[in-house]
């Protein structure tokens, strides 16, 4: 191959679209599906109207959400198309109006419900990524870009907020909803721990199954102080008999012996007794009815939330949770018997990357919750003053706008993370490309974290082995390799589950097993 052909291939490979492609794909997916998914999760905004006698309940139903292309409202009230260069020069945000269908509904029962007001209203403004599908210059030719003052070689992939160019740093994180088994040193003893970061709708819960030095299993999860006995919790989830619990953990004789020790030490023998025992833990000193109610709520809300499936019976969800905990227990025992090696947290199969679209989805979820609280307050205030309940009067668009713009402008993200958004490094062209392809670890810079900072064999071809800063950020701030391809999330999870079921995989939540034809 001659030198000119190599240059052509190189030029084509490192085209404007490729270098920040992972940002574009992720942000476009957020605009196409992610925003609507967040709105569908919320679905309704409930109010306290109707709590008093003689009043009918009122709630707001949320519908389709859409984003137009960036506009700017001038002093005379007219609205014009906005281009990135104009946003930079005028120190304004390159953002587009967001519209949502909303309906104020009054009435207690479904038969009596009536729509008081229904319309599509502007709920705020969304910062738009330069070069994304909704960007006004996305389809411009090289000459058209030059005519409006844009650099044709600019890769895009960043936001313009208050005139400043901000890039969202790709964030490295441990894979959610995956069992990781490891040994831990606690009180001078080495114990086996199986953990999973259970994640659903932006809520992340760390669930731990530990095998103590006495050989007993204990489970820790949010909202319960300390740890809960494994057998007690599994019984509370619906696995009542000793035989079923042991069978679900393992049929291996060595592991069965360990499980028999746990069953002998069990305090309760029935599901009802287990729920009562848990209720005394989570609501000590309260009445028995409240304790039971609180125990059921904690199990359903905070224990392995990722196993909740729409349309799946609550009893089946609890059984799935029990099976999952049994699998975690088996991982602990296998580790204790040297049947498996401890999982490597630095292995790239155990990591996931949060790109622009994922970060914006987290941001939009908290912004929408803030808007929902404000709409609830405005509706209740309008009702107290006997005013007409209408969508246009209760939605204040600056509430959502502020919640979306401020984190990008400052870098202080939801969940207490900082440095997520950074000023684009414009030292030179290569500096821009490097910044767009950079990723950061959530680990503290002040701690040694020697293993996390080291090169790992699984980074080969994915992460550049040499481009990392010196000093405290060494090994924690990394860059993508040149030929790296970043895969995106599966678009239709339900379709994937059905295909797996057709291939013969059994026990998929929400999917009935498909009978395989016999040979």
Image: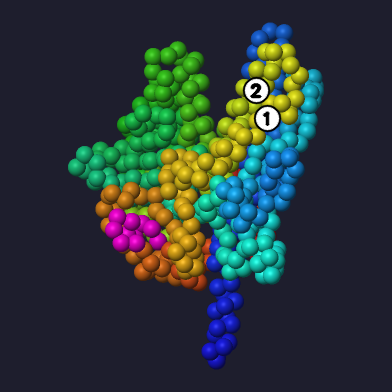
Magenta segment range? 469-478
Marks 2 and 1, the one that precedes in the sequence: 2
SS under mark 2: helix
In the displayed orientation, state which residue is furthest to the bottom: 2
Q: Is residue 371 above or below residue 184?
A: above
Q: Is residue 277 above or below residue 83?
A: above
| Residue drawn at 73 percent across, 48 percent down | 80
Location of residue 187 in the rendering, given as x and y in whole percent from the top left corner? 21, 39
Question: Could you tell me if residue 302 is visible in this image?
Answer: yes
Report the coloring of the rendering.
Answer: rainbow
| Dot 2 crowding, Cα within 10 Å, few <14, some 14–19, many 20+ | some
Location of residue 184 in the rendering, given as x and y in whole percent from the top left corner? 28, 46
Q: Is residue 274 left or right of residue 90?
A: left
What number is the disc on residue 277?
A: none
Q: Is residue 159 above or below residue 300?
A: below
| Dot 1 crowding, Cα within 10 Å, few <14, some 14–19, many 20+ | many
Residue at which label 2 appears: 378
Q: Nearer the viewer, residue 245 or 291?
A: 291
Location of residue 140 in the rendering, given as x and y in whole percent from the top left corner? 70, 64
Asked if residue 497 is among those painted magenta in the image, a careful observer would answer no
> Quarter holding the N terminus?
bottom right
Residue at which label 1 appears: 395
Q: Nearer the viewer, residue 192 or 206?
A: 206
In the displayed orientation, state which residue is furthest to the left: 188
SS under mark 1: loop
Tags 2 and 1 touching, CB below 8 Å = yes
């Amino acid at each position: 191959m001659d030198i000119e052909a190599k240059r052509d291939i190189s030029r084509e490979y490192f085209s404007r679209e490729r270098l920040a492609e992972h940002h574009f794909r992720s942000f476009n997916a957020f605009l196409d599906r992610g925003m609507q998914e967040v709105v569908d999760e919320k679905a309704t905004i409930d109010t306290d109207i109707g709590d008093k006698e003689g009043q009918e309940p009122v709630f707001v139903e949320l519908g389709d959400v859409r984003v137009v292309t960036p506009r700017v409202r001038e002093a005379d009230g007219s609205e014009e198309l906005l281009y990135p260069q104009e946003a930079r020069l005028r120190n304004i945000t390159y953002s587009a109006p967001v519209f949502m269908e909303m309906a104020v509904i009054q009435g207690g029962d479904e038969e009596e419900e009536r729509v008081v007001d229904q319309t599509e209203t502007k709920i705020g403004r969304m910062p738009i990524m330069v070069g994304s599908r909704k960007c006004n210059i996305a389809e411009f030719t090289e000459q058209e870009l030059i005519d409006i003052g844009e650099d044709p070689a600019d890769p895009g992939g960043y936001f313009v907020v208050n005139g400043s160019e901000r890039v969202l740093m790709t964030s490295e994180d441990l894979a959610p909803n995956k069992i990781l088994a490891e040994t831990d040193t606690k009180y001078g003893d080495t114990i086996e721990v199986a953990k999973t970061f259970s994640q659903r709708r932006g809520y992340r819960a760390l669930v731990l199954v530990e095998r103590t030095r006495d050989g007993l299993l204990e489970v820790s999860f949010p909202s319960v102080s300390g740890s809960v006995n494994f057998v007690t919790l599994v019984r509370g989830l619906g696995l009542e008999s000793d035989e079923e619990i042991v069978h679900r953990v393992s049929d291996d004789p060595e592991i069965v012996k360990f499980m028999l020790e746990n069953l002998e030490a069990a305090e309760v023998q029935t599901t009802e007794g287990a729920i009562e025992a848990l209720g005394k833990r989570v609501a000590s000193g309260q009445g028995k009815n409240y304790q039971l109610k609180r125990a059921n709520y904690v199990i359903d809300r905070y224990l392995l939330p990722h196993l909740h499936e729409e349309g799946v019976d609550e009893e089946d969800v609890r059984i799935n949770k029990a099976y999952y905990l049994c699998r975690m227990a088996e991982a602990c025992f296998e580790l204790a018997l040297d049947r498996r090696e401890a999982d490597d947290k630095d292995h790239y199969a155990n990591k996931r990357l949060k790109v622009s679209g994922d970060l914006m989805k987290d941001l939009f979820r908290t912004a929408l919750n803030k808007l929902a609280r404000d709409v609830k307050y405005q509706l209740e205030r309008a009702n107290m003053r006997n005013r007409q309940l209408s969508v246009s009067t209760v939605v204040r668009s600056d509430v959502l706008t502020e919640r979306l713009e401020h984190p990008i402008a400052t870098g202080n993200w939801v969940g207490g993370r900082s440095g997520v958004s950074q000023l684009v490094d414009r030292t030179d062209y290569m500096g821009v490309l490097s910044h767009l392809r950079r990723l950061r670890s959530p680990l503290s810079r002040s701690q040694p974290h020697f293993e996390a900072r080291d090169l790992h064999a699984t980074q080969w071809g994915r992460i550049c082995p040499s481009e990392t800063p010196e000093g405290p950020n060494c090994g924690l701030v990394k860059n993508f390799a040149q030929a790296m391809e970043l895969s995106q999330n599966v678009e239709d999870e339900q379709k994937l589950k059905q295909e797996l079921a057709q291939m013969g995989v059994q026990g998929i939540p929400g999917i009935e097993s498909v009978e395989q034809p016999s040979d």
